[in-house]
Image: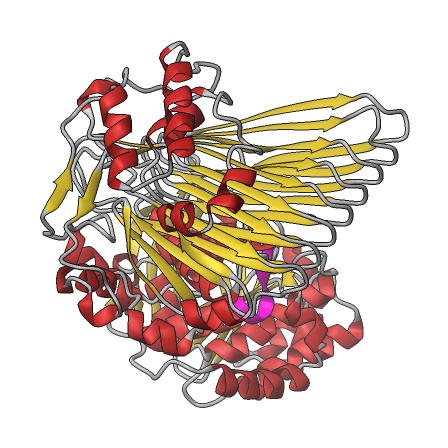
Amino acid sequence: MSIDVETKKTVKSITKKYKYGFTTDVNSDRAPKGLNEDIVRLISKKKKEPKWLLDWRLRAFEAWKKMKEPNWSMVKFPKINYQDSYYYSAPKPKKKLKNLNEVDPAILSTYEKLGIPLEEQKRLAGVAVDYVFDSTSVATTFKDQLAKLGIIFCSFSEAAQSHPELVKKYLGTVIPYTDNYFATLNSAVFSDGSFVYIPPGVKCPMELSTYFRINAENTGQFERTLIIADKDSYVSYLEGCTAPMRDENQLHAACVELITLDNAEIKYSTVQNWYPGDEKGKGGVYNFVTKRGACRGNNSKISWTQVETGSAITWKYPSCILQGDNSVGEFYSVAITNNFQQADTGTKMIHLGKNTKSTIISKGISAGKGQNTYRGLVRMGPKATDGRNFTQCDSLLIGDKCGAHTVPYIEVKNQSAKVEHEATTSKISDDQMFYCRQRGLDQENAVSLIVNGFCKQVLKELPMEFAVEAQKLLGISLEGSVG
Amino acid sequence: MLKIEDLHVNVENKKILQGLDLEIAPGEIHAIMGPNGSGKSTLANVLSGKDGYEVIKGKITFFKNNLFDLEPENRAGEGLFLAFQYPVEIPGVSGMNFLRTTMNAVRKHRKQKELDGVNFLKILREKAKFIKMDEKLIKRSVNTGFSGGEKKRSEILQMSLLEPKLAILDETDSGLDIDALKTVANGVNNLKNKDRSFLIITHYQRLLNYIIPDKVHILLKGKIIKSGDKNLAIELEKKGYEGMK
């Protein structure tokens, strides 16, 4: 679990502080700055979308114009000028791509720098990857193999054309286009994202993975992901993010909708490592994400696991609506804030069906001047007989200028429901640090070891290939936080 | 290998060590005995580099290094090991992981090859067996929920894995039953060789029945007031600290 010191040194020497701080020179095809109905129409047209989808976007845009930016969270940031951003940007496609050899070499080399060479990954990890580069998917692998099982794994725009009936049936049914300011904005201008459909009875044989990467300057990112697990099916989905170093703040407002039918399960794992801003709090990504899953079917399950180390601001509450009887929702989270980072994150577990269960394990780590808030809602509806929830929120503080906050909401409308909430706040003690150092670990490795121990309950939920990366990230994110 | 000259140390402006001299040659076992408050643990902590100790005066040479120039982790790398009086719990970090990480950290410092999982396990099993440490215990979080005896055993296991040149045992015998005491002593005796030295800090003569020291020093009010061979410990047992003044 230790961080290889060589690696860290190399990383430092290349990028000074931020591991993935570089940009790729690809000629961007982008719409003019600003947001109006024409831009919405342009995006839809560029994507060759059916009319109903354009209408849906326009309804969302109308709704958005009447909405106000939410201000109830703990995060603070200067007012965003939504008219000063680009809402459409795509790498210039030379022609329709058939295989990886046709992908722009500059893009491929970006992925190499990230340590995820496509060839290597295809062969070794057995991961089918749907790369989103800026806003347009450039290559989709393993599609044939998945297609044989009837699994659909493609970009959202492709799905809108090739499987409009599925998209139309499920889009916006978990996160309505009027849901909240950022989700509504996303509904109007979403660029692309992933679409997954697992047919009845199919267990997806590999982890499906998308690497998101923000690349063009000043491009707001509006990904839209929709995953449907039909009856008796299973899928594990990985989402990993890195971003190049930027001075100006970048807005990111993604939407992820998950749907499980009877006996189906979706496991959704995220490692978020966008540019957090520098030591003085300059720059960094604003990450305003709406993620929600609906356990529609009986005995279905949705499990969210997230490791949030990046972004200047994280505003994110992956939630579960437990509609089906005996359905299960899980939320495992590690959020790190260092320097001037702010995170307001948590989950909502809405128990509607009988005998529904939910588990929340949240680990917040604050260092530097970071502010970390857990905000969660557990609601037991009147019909959620024998509903159960267990919540554990642990906060770890490093230094004396950071903050940890816990804001749990509990609403119980059913006598037979049981809700448990545990919370702890601790500091890395001098004695722990000294003990590790006496055994030969330097300060950064000692912190990394202790923090990884603190987060173990969550990290063990991650798929193998993610777990290693996540452990390293925790160490890198906390560099310079002690001593 | 270790030379302490005229060491004066304050803790929160209070004089604790007041002119301590000590020299340990390779392969020697030294015992320091002293009553509560005589500065025994302060000496251990200053040697290992813990914060909060103000060195007013004096010099410590460890091999060719000025010890004060080295960070605690580099002292460990150079071969200084402290078996803690109160080993610290680290929740969530498995003993396995901790042992391998620390072992590889000091190996790296010593320009030795890092151990892969298989070789590490082989060495670990062998050492753990010798000091009768249950493997289940090693899989648990470091020291978390361990009994006093288990914690001390775990310190000895770490000592044997990290292969120090100078091991300081800070009251490792306190709170141990006779069987655990023998195991600890066995561990030390087994590690003893012509290059490896030990500094054993203790209240009682008991441990010295099992580990035969080359030299015994009596520490009183921050100064070594008397040095001798193992018989000094026996004399002390009879007369008490008051009688030694």
Position of residue B145 in the picture relative to residue A23 (left or right): right
* In magenta stretch: residue A323: no
User: Residue at image x 13%, y 60%?
Assistant: A106
Eyeballing the image, is A123 above or below A370?
A: below
Q: Position of residue A66 (x, y in %)?
A: 40, 9
User: Residue at image x 68%, y 73%?
Assistant: B207
Between B94 and B133, the one nearer to me in the picture: B94
Image quadrant where residue A144 sits: bottom left
Q: Position of residue A182 (x, y in %)?
A: 41, 25
* In magenta stretch: residue B94: yes
Eyeballing the image, is A326 above or below A53?
A: below
Eyeballing the image, is B106 above or below A332?
A: below
Span highlighted in magenta in the image: B89-98
Q: Position of residue B41 (x, y in %)?
A: 53, 54
Q: Is residue A313 visible?
A: no
Position of residue B136 in the picture relative to residue B93 (left or right): right
